[in-house]
């Protein structure tokens, strides 16, 4: 395989054309990776609690009564697609495509993120209707500690997209704004990774062992 | 076609490959769950393995983490965090499971 040109820092990067922005964001991007990894440890703790709590249903509704796998499938596809679109926004930036392309992919990502949140909240409301509220059992407390935590991250990502969209408009493609786009893309891909953990452990694991 | 747009195309293809791979793995997972049911541990093992594969696909194709020298620092950071995470999770499950067995709340 041919070696990619400048890779001054690992993972996503802006490339030779934006060398100054690339240089400026080298340290912050690594720092952002450190943040992501500590966030990962936080999520890991919540996963550990969930795993130990799977049996603690206290006679309340369990995974088979509560989980709507069709909705989970839809949410998975939506989040996966949004991961692609944020990547395409990142590429549009890296290769100096017209700015509307970046804004377009940002908007698609934002819409997908909001769709994901709407479906997720609808699921939670369905669960609550069936008696699946956080205070019902240890299992449900652990569930509501973990899955909405991911949802809050997605909501923060959506807010970030909006703020960055405004910054793109007001400041234009400055080095700082570009390095922020890189970090947003990292964050968004990271949320997709966590979601894979959630469907595998929380949903499928819950259905198997719950 | 100049070199830049050729590179752009190549990187774009990389994202699309990652997306396709993830879609395929997601589809397989849900198909397995739908066809075989999710009650048995063998099926769950298959689902967990496919989930792991999907994590790797996304790390490589979306986050561009691989064994190239330039991304090695990050790989080290990720691997170390995963080590910490595994100690936390497996340790918790081990201890709490053992405790549950001793308290006779969980069948041996």
Image (cartoon, rainbow, N blue to C red):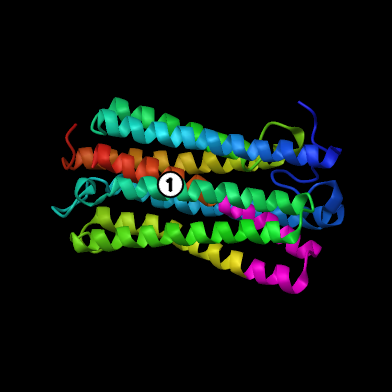
Q: In the rendered view of the protein, which quadrant contains the C terminus of chain A?
A: top left
At x 63%, y 43%, the residue is B63
On the image, the x and y values in percent for residue A59 come to 13, 52
Q: Residue at the spot x=34%, y=32% of the render?
A: B31
Vertical placement of residue B18 versus A191, above or below: above
x, y (%) of residue A106?
62, 59
Q: Which residue is mark 1?
A: A76
Q: Residue furthest bottom?
A: A170
User: At 25% from the left edge and 60% from the top edge, which residue is drawn?
Assistant: A126
Judge left or right: residue B45 versus residue A140: right
Nearer to me, A199 or B2: B2
Q: Is residue A125 above or below residue B49?
A: below
Residue under mark 1: which chain is it in? A
Question: Which one is nearer the viewer's eye here, B10 or A160?
Answer: B10
Residue found 67% across the figure and 34% down from its top: B66
Q: Main secondary structure of the magenta part?
A: helix
User: Is residue B46 placed above or below B100 in the rendered structure?
Assistant: above
**Left or right: A74 in relation to A42:** left
Residue A105 image offset from top left, x and y in percent: 62, 56
Q: Tell me which segment is drawn in magenta.
A: A163-189
Q: Secondary structure at mark 1?
A: helix
């Amino acid at each position: 395989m041919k070696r990619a040109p400048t890779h001054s820092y690992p993972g996503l990067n802006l490339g030779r054309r934006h060398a100054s922005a690339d240089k400026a964001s080298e340290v912050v991007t690594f720092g952002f990776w450190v943040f992501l990894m500590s966030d990962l440890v936080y999520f890991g703790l919540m996963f550990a609690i969930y795993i130990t709590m799977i049996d603690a249903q206290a006679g309340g509704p369990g995974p088979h009564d509560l989980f709507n796998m069709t909705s989970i499938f839809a949410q998975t596809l939506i989040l996966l697609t949004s991961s692609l679109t944020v990547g395409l926004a990142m590429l549009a930036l890296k290769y100096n495509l017209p700015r509307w392309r970046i804004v377009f992919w940002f908007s698609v990502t934002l819409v997908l993120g909001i769709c994901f949140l709407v479906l997720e909240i609808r699921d939670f409301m369905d669960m609550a209707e069936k008696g699946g509220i956080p205070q019902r059992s240890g299992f449900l407390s652990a569930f509501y500690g973990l899955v909405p935590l991911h949802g809050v991250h997605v909501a923060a990502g959506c807010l970030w997209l909006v703020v960055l969209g405004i910054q793109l408009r007001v400041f234009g493609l400055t080095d700082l704004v570009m390095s922020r786009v890189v970090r947003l893309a990292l964050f968004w891909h990271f949320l997709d990774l966590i979601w894979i953990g959630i469907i595998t452990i929380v949903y499928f694991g819950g259905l198997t062992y719950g | 076609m100049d070199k830049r747009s050729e590179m752009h195309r190549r990187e774009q293809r990389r994202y699309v490959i990652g997306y396709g791979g993830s879609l395929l793995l997601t589809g397989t997972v849900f198909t397995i769950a739908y066809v075989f049911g999710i009650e048995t541990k063998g099926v769950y093992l298959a689902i967990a393995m496919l989930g792991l594969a999907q994590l790797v696909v996304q790390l490589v194709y979306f986050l561009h983490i691989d064994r190239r020298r330039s991304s090695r620092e990050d790989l080290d950071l990720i691997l170390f965090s995963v080590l910490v995470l595994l100690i936390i999770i497996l340790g918790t499950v081990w201890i709490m499971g053992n405790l549950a067995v001793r308290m006779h709340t969980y069948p041996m």
